[in-house]
C-alpha cells in the first residue's frame, strides 16, 4: 500500500516525536490505528468540486483524510481535475490494472468506496471490517484486499463488489501489497512487528515474517523477488526475499518512515519519512540510500507513475502533493489538494470513446461515360471504393481509412469534410473478391469496419442504401453490423 497515514503523529509542520521509556512511539501508532488522534493544526474547509468525466491519461488519486474526498490529479498538467466525495476519513487508495475503478478505504467507517474513473463518481460502497486502512488490487483486477483495524483482511470480488472472504490476522493490520503473479499478499502488522503472508488460493496466512519495529508501508518489486517494508519504530526498511520469506537486508532511512513505492523498472524504492519531511531513495542493487529528497511537511503516501519518470508524495502537513523528477530526484511541482492528504495511487485511465459507423461502396466507371453503376461480376475498367465515416450521425473528417482485400493493403486515404475516403483499385480482381474499409480508432473514437463483396453467381452488386452506416454489405445476405475491431 502506498501512503500509509499516521494521524496520531506530531502536529503539522513538527518533526519531533517522543520515544521515552514504555515505547511512547507505539502509543502514537496505536492511537492512529484506533482513529482517536488527528494531525494537529487548523483545518481549512475546502469547496468540493463537481466530479468531472476523466480524459485519457495518467492520473493520481489522493485520499484526503479530513475533507472526506479524493483529489484527482492529471499528471500531464499537475492540476486537480476532479474532487470525489467518499466516506469518512479516507486513507488507503488503489486503482485496478485496467484503470476503470479506484478503491478507497474509509477509516472511520466499515466501508470502501468504489470510484468509476470514467465519471469520477462513487458507483458502489462495500461493507468490510471496522476501520479499514490499506487496500491493494490483484494484478488480474478480480480481487481487492483491505486491511482493517478490527484485525482482519477483507477480500472483495471486484465484479460484484462484495466481500467473498475474510482472513483473520490478529493485531490490527495496516499496509498491504500483492505479488505480481497474484499468489501472495504481504500485510504489515505494527502491533506484532511482523508481516503476515496470505496465500490467495486459500486466503489463509501461511507464515509471518519478523521485521523492524512497527511496520507500516509495504511495496513489492516488479519481478516479485523482494518486499520492502518501512518500520516507523526503527526508522528503517526491511528487505524480504520472497523465495525464503526472510529478511535479507535492513536499510536505515529517515525519521518515522511511512509510504513505500518501487519504480516500474525495479531499480529504486522511494520511502516517505513523516517526521523528517523527506523521501529516501534506495538503490535496490545495493540496498543503500542514494539520495534524500526534501519535500513538504509530514509526507505520508508515495506512488510512482507508470513510466517511472515522476513520484507523487502526499504532504499531510501542507495539504499538497510534491512531485519528484526521478531523473534528478528533485521536487519539480507542488499540487494543492484536499485537507490531510494520505494515501495515493496512480494509474492510466482510458476515457470512453465515441462510437463510429462506417459504410463502403464499390463503384465502376462506365466506359466512355462519367456516370457510375454498381459493379457486376468483374469488370475491365477497375473500380473505386468509397467509404464514409460518421460519429453520432455526423461526418468525421481527418481520419485515416485503410482499404484491404484478403488482408492485403490496397491504399489508405484520409476522410474529407464529408467523412468520405476513396481508393481506386488499380487492376481487375477476381469475381468473388471482398473489400474491407477499416478505421482503427483513436483516443476519442471507437474503431469500425465495413465490407462489400462481389458474387460471380449474381449479375450485379447488391443495392445498398446510402445511410447503411456501420453495416457490412454481403451479396445474398441481409445487411449485418460490420465487425468491430
Image (cartoon, rainbow, N blue to C red):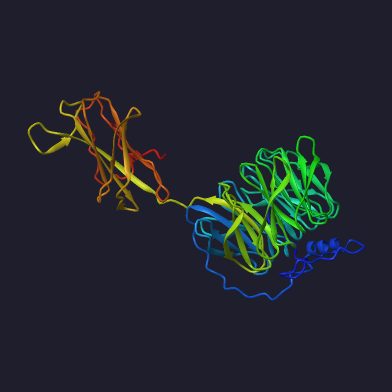
Instruction: Quadrant for residue 241, please give it.
Output: top right
Q: How many marks?
A: 0
Question: What residue is at 81 percent from the left and 52 percent from the top?
Answer: 189
Identify the image quadrant of residue 134.
Answer: bottom right
Q: Is residue 143 visible?
A: yes
**Height in image: 151 above or below 84?**
above
Residue sitting at x 68%, y 68%: 317
Q: Is residue 90 left or right of residue 404?
A: right
Q: Nearer the viewer, residue 207 or 446?
A: 207
Q: Is residue 80 left or right of residue 452?
A: right
* Residue 411 spot, x, y in % from top left: 28, 34
Which residue occupies the foreground of this view, 46 or 430? 46
Percent across and percent down for residue 468 are: 29, 44
Does residue 93 appear in the picture of this structure?
no
Q: Indicate the position of residue 225 as horizontal and vertical percent values.
A: 71, 37
Farthest residue toward the right? Answer: 21
Seen at 14% across and 37% down, the residue is: 372
Residue 1, above or below 298: above
Q: Position of residue 136 (x, y in %)?
A: 68, 50
In the image, residue 288 sits, relative to residue 301, either above or below, namely above
Q: Quadrant of the C terminus?
A: top left
Residue sitting nearer the eye, 282 or 171: 282
Residue furthest to the left in view is: 368
Amino acid at each position: 500500500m502506498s501512503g500509509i497515514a499516521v494521524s496520531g503523529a506530531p502536529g503539522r509542520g513538527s518533526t519531533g516525536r517522543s520515544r521515552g521509556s514504555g515505547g511512547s512511539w507505539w502509543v502514537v501508532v496505536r492511537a492512529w490505528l484506533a482513529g482517536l488522534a488527528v494531525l494537529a493544526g487548523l483545518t481549512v474547509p475546502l469547496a468540493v468540486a463537481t466530479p468531472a468525466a476523466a480524459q485519457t491519461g495518467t492520473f493520481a488519486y489522493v485520499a484526503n483524510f479530513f475533507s472526506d474526498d479524493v483529489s484527482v490529479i492529471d499528471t500531464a498538467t499537475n492540476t486537480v481535475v476532479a474532487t470525489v466525495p467518499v466516506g469518512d476519513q479516507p486513507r488507503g487508495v488503489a486503482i485496478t490494472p485496467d484503470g476503470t475503478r479506484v478503491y478507497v478505504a474509509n477509516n472511520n467507517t466499515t466501508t470502501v468506496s468504489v470510484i468509476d474513473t470514467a465519471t469520477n463518481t462513487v458507483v458502489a460502497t462495500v461493507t468490510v471490517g471496522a476501520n479499514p486502512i490499506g487496500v491493494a488490487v490483484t494484478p488480474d483486477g478480480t480481487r481487492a484486499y483491505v486491511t482493517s483495524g478490527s484485525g482482519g483482511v477483507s477480500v472483495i470480488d471486484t465484479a460484484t463488489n462484495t466481500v467473498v472472504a475474510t482472513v483473520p490476522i490478529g493485531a490490527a493490520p495496516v499496509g498491504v501489497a500483492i505479488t505480481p503473479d497474484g499468489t501472495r499478499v504481504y500485510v504489515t502488522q505494527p502491533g506484532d512487528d511482523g508481516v503476515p503472508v496470505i496465500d490467495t488460493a486459500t486466503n489463509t496466512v501461511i507464515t509471518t515474517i519478523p521485521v523492524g519495529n512497527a511496520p507500516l508501508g509495504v511495496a513489492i518489486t516488479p519481478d516479485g523477488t523482494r518486499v520492502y517494508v518501512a518500520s516507523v519504530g526503527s526508522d528503517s526498511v526491511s528487505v524480504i526475499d520472497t523465495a525464503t520469506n526472510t529478511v535479507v537486508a535492513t536499510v536505515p532511512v529517515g525519521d518515522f518512515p511511512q509510504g513505500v513505492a518501487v519504480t516500474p523498472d525495479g531499480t529504486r524504492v522511494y520511502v516517505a519519512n513523516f517526521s523528517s519531511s523527506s523521501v529516501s531513495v534506495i538503490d535496490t542493487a545495493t540496498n543503500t540510500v542514494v539520495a534524500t529528497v526534501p519535500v513538504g511537511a509530514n509526507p505520508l503516501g508515495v506512488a510512482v507513475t507508470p513510466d517511472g519518470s515522476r513520484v507523487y508524495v502526499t504532504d499531510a502537513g501542507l495539504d499538497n502533493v510534491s512531485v519528484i523528477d526521478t531523473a534528478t530526484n528533485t521536487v519539480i511541482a507542488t499540487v494543492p489538494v484536499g485537507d490531510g492528504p494520505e494515501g495515493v495511487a496512480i494509474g492510466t485511465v482510458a476515457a470512453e470513446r465515441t462510437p463510429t459507423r462506417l459504410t463502403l461502396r464499390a463503384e465502376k466507371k462506365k466506359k466512355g461515360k462519367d456516370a457510375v453503376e454498381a459493379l457486376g461480376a468483374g469488370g475491365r475498367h477497375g473500380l473505386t471504393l468509397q467509404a464514409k465515416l460518421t460519429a453520432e450521425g455526423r461526418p468525421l473528417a481527418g481520419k485515416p481509412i485503410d482499404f484491404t482485400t484478403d488482408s492485403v493493403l490496397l491504399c489508405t486515404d484520409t476522410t474529407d469534410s464529408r467523412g468520405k475516403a476513396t481508393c481506386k483499385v488499380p487492376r481487375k480482381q477476381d469475381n468473388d473478391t471482398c473489400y474491407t474499409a477499416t478505421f482503427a480508432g483513436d483516443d476519442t473514437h471507437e474503431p469500425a469496419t465495413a465490407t462489400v463483396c462481389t458474387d460471380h453467381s449474381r449479375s450485379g452488386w447488391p443495392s445498398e442504401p446510402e445511410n447503411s452506416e456501420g453495416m457490412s454489405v454481403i451479396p445474398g445476405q441481409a445487411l449485418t453490423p460490420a465487425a468491430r475491431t
